[in-house]
Image (tube, rainbow, N blue to C red):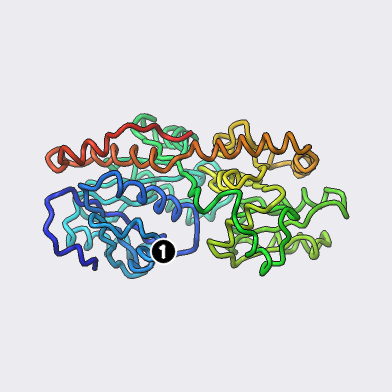
Amino acid sequence: MSPHMSRPSRRPRIGVDFHTFDGIFQGSRSHLLGLYGQAVQLAPHWDFFLLLDDPQALCRDHPVFDRPNVHPTRMPHAAGPVRLAWQLPLLRRELQLDLLHLQYRLPWWGEGPYACTIHDVLFESHPQFFSRPFTWLARWSSRDAVRRARALLTVSAYSQAEMARHYGVAPSRIQVTHNGVDLARFRPDIDPTPLQALGLTPGGYLCCVGRLEPRKNHAGLVQAYARLPAGQRPPLVIVGQRDFAYAEVFKLVQQLGLQDEVRFLERVSDAELGAVLAHARLFVYPSWAEGFGMPVLEAMACGVPVVTSRGTALQEVAEGVAWLADPHDPAQLAQVMARALAEDDAARQARIAQGLARARAFDWASSARVLLQSLAAALPGAMVTPDARAAAASPGRPAG
């Protein structure tokens, strides 16, 4: 446990289920790191207990959490049911937490209050991309979280509207803490040296980033890529780890004879990912549906033009900057990709500048202020000191 824990404190004690830090790099992991990286600085009079398997790695890799008001606390890695039914309720009691913040679902027993971030309800609107057991569990746990959470959060106006529509709650009850971008990690001037080990040439490839699963529509991307003129199209690089039902895209590459032009990079480090994005000629993200779509924003922050899908939260994030295409239509996607690749330098630079501005508008500090306001409202009033209340209510607007 953290060495700070022995220090007595009568300040608000906020617990955060940080177990996603221990897993593969994904949106929910980035969300916690970005959001709480700002929150712990904005609320120095609150104590934050971050619950995860490897506290030392968190402080080593993200020094912002090595602060007097942050207590990284070991919660051994375990399956979800064990974490929800056993570990979190016991840690809440042991650490005397005043509020516990989780993502997607709440512990099965124990007293509140709770805060819950539900990033999306795509299992409601797009159930075809999920297994029946997962859909059943997600629907049950989301309804339970909406009913029991004292602070309810999501990451986009799209997800806010979808939650309100499916669960019959007022949109005003759901606060939006947009995702942001780590502008130190995703920027246009990243050293291209890491590309050498990956066999990539700066500016000489198309890029897509996303777990290999049907919802990300890699099959549609490969079909669209095959329609681009052979001999003129840059190689296509797909960055992402295999998730489920991934075999289709590999078979499709074989069937279309694209083995020499489509590359899959399943093991890319955090440092390499920034370089791969920043030096792509075009970023393509034709996902069927997203609750936010963080890779789109990260590519914009790297100064790369973006082609993405029309609809869901992707259109909200792209907002007039990215090229949009219908994910149902590979032919249209190919046409849009071809137009993007053919754009003259002046138009390309103007689009890049718009993307950089759009990425800067999604600010983790603004979202952290919304988070702190929501947590403060969920705490008993006597638990929030005047200084902490002022920090939580400091001016700032949500990004977007």
Q: Camera-side residue: 42 or 239? A: 42
Tell me where residue 257 appears, x and y as whole percent. Answer: 83, 62
Tell me where residue 208 appears, x and y as whole percent. Answer: 65, 53
Classify mark 1: residues with Cα within 10 Å, few (<14), some (14-19) or many (20+): few
For image coordinates 27% across by 60% down, the residue present is 88
Q: Which residue is mark 1?
A: 61
Q: Is residue 206 left or right of residue 372?
A: right
| Dot 1 amino acid type | Asp
Q: Camera-side residue: 5 or 19? A: 5
For image coordinates 71% across by 62% down, the residue present is 200
Q: Camera-side residue: 362 or 133? A: 362
For image coordinates 51% across by 43% down, the residue present is 291
Answer with the quarter of the image where residue 57 lies.
Answer: bottom left
Tell me where residue 336 appears, x and y as whole percent. Answer: 75, 39
Count of marks overlaid on the render: 1
Which quadrant is the N terminus positioned in? bottom left
Tell me where residue 246 appears, x and y as whole percent. Answer: 64, 61
Above or below for 168 versus 268: above
Above or below for 121 versus 15: above
Instruction: Say which element carries label 1.
Output: helix
Answer with the quarter of the image where residue 65 lies.
Answer: bottom left
Q: Is residue 173 left or right of residue 233?
A: left
Above or below for 243 versus 394: below
Q: Is residue 181 left or right of residue 82?
A: right
For image coordinates 56% across by 44% down, the residue present is 297
